[in-house]
Image (cartoon, rainbow, N blue to C red):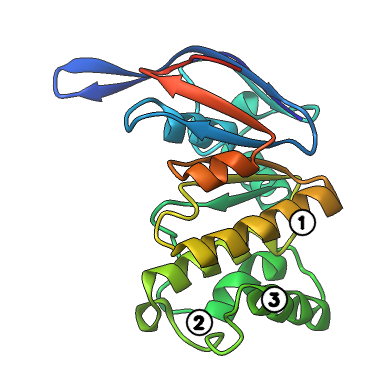
Amino acid sequence: MIQLENITKTYQVGNAPAIGLKNVSLRLAEGELVALVGPSGSGKTTLLNIAGGLMKPDTGTVQIGNRRLDSMSAEELCRFRLDRIGFVFQDYNLIPTLTAFENVELLPALQRTPVKARKEKVSGILARVGLEKFMDRRPSQMSRGQQQRVAICRALVTRPALVLGDEMTANLDSATGAQLMDLLYELNQEAKITILYSTHDAAMMQRAGRVIRMKDGVIENA
């Protein structure tokens, strides 16, 4: 499903380069549920961004299915992400002028899903995470935990082949976090969605089929 081969990524910090990833290789099979763990600055977010085509590596190749992301044009990448990848960002990236319902509806609308079908999907997934009474609220009218749930629903509503999450339950209480992990696990089992997420949450680690540990831009185990 995912193949990252010999990925290196550096950043410029002042006048000196800083290593984000150093010669990282990783393979995930279709339907895997994998947790990335490690201290802040270990390279987890960089790896997720490169795996999702949001950032290009300095060296190495990124392949999802039979497609090479590192050689795609910006337009090709945009279309591929829309159709195949769901993202849950650490800062949510919700559109502030849209309601919870409209934020989740955006991706199926861009995919030209028929109106009735997409409204049923959006209503159903928001209800599954307890947001049926908050569908008409904008992000500024919701708590951070509610915003996080909206972001997760947006990533899952189209049932993409791959979901990438960066600290998905960081702002949730333990009960809500467990509920969302149940939803992720159900979709992983039902639809064979491959899920790769970073976490510091012990419960999220326990639910993963595989835990990958990172430190200083390298994978310590795979």
The vertical placement of 62 against 52, above or below, is above
- The numbered mark, 1 or 2, whose residue comes first in the sequence reads 2
> Is disc 1 placed on a helix, strand or loop?
helix
- Mark 2: few, some, or many residues within 10 Å (few <14, many ≥20)? many
Circle nearer the N terminus (3, 1): 3
The 10 Å Cα crowd at callout 3, few under 14, some 14 to 19, many 20 or more, is many
- If the image is split into quadrants, where does the N terminus sit? top right
Instruction: State which tag comes first along the sequence, 2 or 3.
Output: 2
Amino acid, disc 2: Thr
Q: Residue at x 48, y 79 (%)?
A: 98
Residue 186, disc: 1
Q: Residue at x 38, y 56 (%)?
A: 91
Amino acid, disc 3: Val
Q: Which residue is mark 2?
A: 99
Kindly identify which numbered label has been placed on residue 122.
3
Towards the viewer: 77 or 54: 54
Q: Amino acid at mark 1?
A: Glu
Residue 212 percent coordinates (x, y): 56, 25
Q: Position of residue 177 (x, y in %)?
A: 53, 60
Q: CA distance from mark 1 to mark 2?
A: 26 Å
Task: Please state which of the two labelled residues, at mark 1 or mark 2, is closer to the viewer.
Answer: 1
Kindly identify which numbered label has been placed on residue 65.
none
Residue found 79% across the figure and 70% down from its top: 113
